[in-house]
Image (cartoon, grey):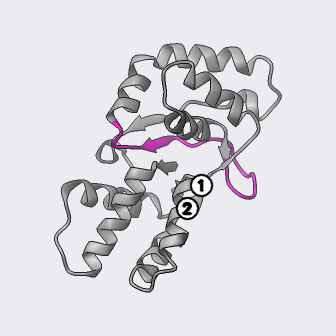
């Protein structure tokens, strides 16, 4: 299974690692995000972050205080890369009321791949963004219809793209 952490969930997981490293207690959301990150980063699972999160983490990794923890986190995640049709799908999601950032995360989860282009899409988006989750759940059927209409004109593997589950970290079932 492939799991994508949105920027907030990734930040909370890294904060959790930093708190643990400093011997401090973790907030509930940090604990849940870190727990998911740890479970989803072990084979046969794969853990991903979005490119903007990777950029921010690489900047923070230049600071000696944060470098070891961020390098540890980055060693267990991959950056999900936009594949063909990512921009078109993001535009269609924005037409359904998603913010530019939320549409990018969701489009990446459907039309995203790794650096070797070995797969298309992921199964779970882990997020604490309640507005995005609510919009996704309320419009899931409409979103699926739009994707299906778009897929009729696409070649493989893009015609086989699937929508992910959009869940809070504690809802993601990863064994």
Residue 106 placed where, x, y %?
54, 36
Nearer-the-camera pick, 65 or 3: 65
Q: Is 153 on the left or on the right of 70, as rendered?
A: right
Classify 60 as above or below 133.
Answer: below
Q: Nearer the viewer, residue 58 or 117?
A: 58
Which residue appears at 55% of the width and 70% of the height? 58
The residue sitting at the right extreme is: 155
| Residue 131 in the image: above or below residue 14 | above
**Residue 116 visible (yes or no):** yes
Which residue is more in the foreground, 140 or 104? Answer: 104
Determine which residue is flagged by label 2: 54
Whole-percent x, y for residue 60 in the image: 47, 72
Q: Position of residue 174 (x, y in %)?
A: 39, 50
The CA span between labels 1 and 2 is 5 Å
Q: Is residue 124 left or right of residue 144?
A: left
Mark 1: give few (<14), some (14-19) or many (20+) Cα within 10 Å.
some
Based on the displayed image, in which of its 4 quarters is residue 152 positioned?
top right
Range drawn in magenta: 113-129
Local SS, label 1: helix
Q: Residue furthest left?
A: 25
Q: Residue at x 44, y 57 (%)?
A: 40
The image shows residue 127 at horizontal and vertical percentages of 38, 43
For image coordinates 35% across by 26% down, the residue present is 134
Q: Which residue is mark 1?
A: 51
Task: Give left or right: position of 156 versus 75.
Answer: right
Circles 1 and 2, Cβ within 8 Å, touching? The answer is: yes
**SS category of the residue bearing label 2:** helix
Q: How many marks?
A: 2
Is residue 44 highlighted in magenta? Answer: no
Q: Nearer the viewer, residue 40 or 11?
A: 11
Secondary structure, magenta segment, majority class: loop
Task: Identify the residue at image location x=56%, y=25%.
Answer: 94
């Amino acid at each position: 299974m492939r799991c994508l952490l949105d920027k907030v969930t990734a930040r909370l997981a890294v904060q959790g690692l930093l708190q643990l490293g400093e011997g401090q207690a973790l907030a509930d959301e940090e604990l849940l995000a870190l727990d998911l990150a740890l479970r989803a980063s072990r084979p046969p699972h794969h853990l991903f972050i979005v490119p903007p999160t990777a950029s921010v983490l690489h900047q923070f990794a230049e600071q000696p205080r944060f470098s070891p923890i961020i390098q540890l986190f980055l060693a267990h995640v991959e950056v999900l890369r936009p594949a063909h049709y990512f921009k078109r799908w993001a535009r269609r999601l924005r037409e359904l009321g998603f913010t530019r950032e939320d549409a990018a995360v969701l489009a990446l989860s459907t039309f995203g791949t790794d650096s070797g282009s070995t797969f298309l899409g992921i199964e779970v988006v882990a997020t604490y963004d309640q507005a995005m989750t609510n919009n996704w759940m309320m419009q899931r059927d409409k979103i699926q219809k739009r994707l299906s209409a778009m897929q009729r004109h696409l070649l493989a593997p893009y015609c086989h793209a699937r929508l992910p589950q959009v869940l809070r970290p504690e809802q993601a079932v990863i064994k």
